[in-house]
Image: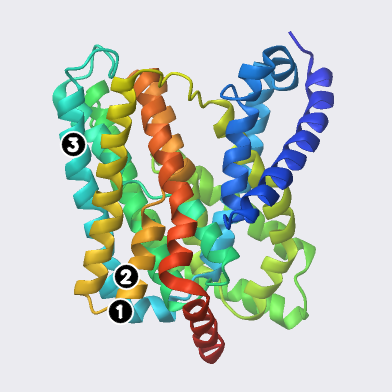
Amino acid sequence: MLSDFDLSVRLFLQLAFILGMCRLVGWLARLIHQPQVVGEMIAGVVMGPSLLGWAFPAAQGWLFPEQSRTILFALSQVGLALYMFLVGVELRVDILRQRVRSAAAVSVAGMVTPFVLGGALGLWLVGEPDMFGPQVHRFGAALFVGAAMAITAFPMLARIIYERGLSGTSLGTLALTAGAIDDGAAWCVLAVVIASMDHTWSIAAKAIGGGVIYAWFVLTLGRRGLRLLGAKAEAAGRLTNPILAFTLALVMLAAWYTDVIGIYAVFGAFLLGVAMPHGFFAERIQRAIEPLVVALLLPLFFTYSGLNTRLNLVDTPWLWWVSLVVLAAACVGKGGACWLAARLCGEDNRTALAVGALMNARGLMELIILNIGLQRGIISPTFFSIMVVMAIATTLMAAPLFEWVYGRRARRQGELGKELLD
């Protein structure tokens, strides 16, 4: 049992190790044309029981004792909330208004199709041994797998768009908006699943109703109040420490509220960022907090999730066959459906394929929903590992597919369009 002092001392070593591993694996990932964020995701798995814990269990256990994971979790949630706040600040609402029809269509297709396929998989696998908890009924299994298949790696998608220089462009805004709607809906479905397991439907009502009320308040009355904050900063000619502290307090409050109602902290922070005034204030707030968030806090999120991932449980031909079926259903249901929806809304084929490639990534949002299912006994460790394989595979596919279908020339065109809008 480590004392608080020992935990704090160990934390500094953990942070140094995490940052070093994330930079090293990120550099290796860039050699094969993967973004830094994918390298950080892989680094998290490498530092967990799947590799480091398997090869050097004593060293991994000493470096990341169970007691310290609570601290890592708390820091990772702060970093994730701040990062999604920055993503919201960068969202161009003027472009969103031009793409609302496409974003809605892509969101519905990217939610409904994988949800149906995932539900079918749940009905198929609920009768198999060691896949779901003994108390899980067919309806609950179908709902949970459907929600898990419908999730999009919203933070991952945002990071890829940021690293590719597409923040604020038409494609970037379309993909981010569709991903945000998809994930918000998936979390509401998850609330229904948990309610069906606990027989407490108030959970679902609180998540859906509280989310709608929060979105309405922040994007209407909240936006008007935040304009005064932006005007005060512009009048001062700089982002003063009191204004920065007040803004950060608002981010934490927004994340707390959406976490409490059951939707997840990132959406509260993201919507608050969307409501922030653009121009001078947005530029200054990004300049003040973005370097520390991206370089230090966000990698902790990937590391914490990797510490809870075990890939060595998928160890038979039957389980690998199930993994391939799950992966195929995930790609067809999300990537294929989003591509088709974008095409039907008039997007050119290259843009539609790029949207499908980005939306198909599950990333660590998938790991979050899977961890909830594992902790509540909805799914077994074996099925958890199968879904993790799918999440990693679809995430690894996202950047190469995006680069292949969209290409540098189209990306430069997107950047030119952004400059013209600015």
Quick check: 370 left or right of 266? left
Residue shown at 32% from the left, 40% from the top: 327
| Residue type (three-letter) at the residue carrying disc 1 | Asp
Q: Are marks 2 and 1 in contact (CB under 8 Å)?
A: yes
Discs 2/3, front: 2
Which residue, given by chain and number where applicable, does mark 2 sit on?
352
Q: Considering depth in this image, is 255 or 18 the residue closer to the camera?
A: 18
Q: Are marks 2 and 3 in contact (CB under 8 Å)?
A: no
Label 2: few (<14), some (14–19) or many (≥20) C-alpha neighbours in 10 Å = many
| Vertical order, 267 against 277 (above or below) | above
Which residue, given by chain and number where applicable, does mark 1 sit on?
348
Q: Secondary structure at mark 2?
A: helix
Q: Quadrant of residue 7?
A: top right
The image position of residue 416, as x and y in percent, is: 54, 87
Q: Secondary structure at mark 1?
A: loop
Q: CA distance from mark 3 to mark 1?
A: 31 Å
Q: Residue furthest top?
A: 1
| Residue type (three-letter) at the residue carrying disc 3 | Gly
Q: Quadrant of residue 212?
A: bottom left
The disc, 3 or 1, on the residue closer to the chain's N-terminal end is 3
Label 1: few (<14), some (14–19) or many (≥20) C-alpha neighbours in 10 Å = few
Query: Quarter of the image containing the C terminus?
Result: bottom right
Q: Is residue 230 visible?
A: yes
The disc, 2 or 3, on the residue closer to the chain's N-terminal end is 3
Residue shown at 38% from the left, 38% from the top: 390
Q: Is residue 264 visible?
A: no
Q: Considering depth in this image, is 361 or 312 the residue closer to the camera?
A: 312
Which residue, given by chain and number where applicable, does mark 3 sit on?
119
The image position of residue 236, as x and y in percent, is: 77, 79
The image position of residue 186, as x and y in percent, is: 31, 45
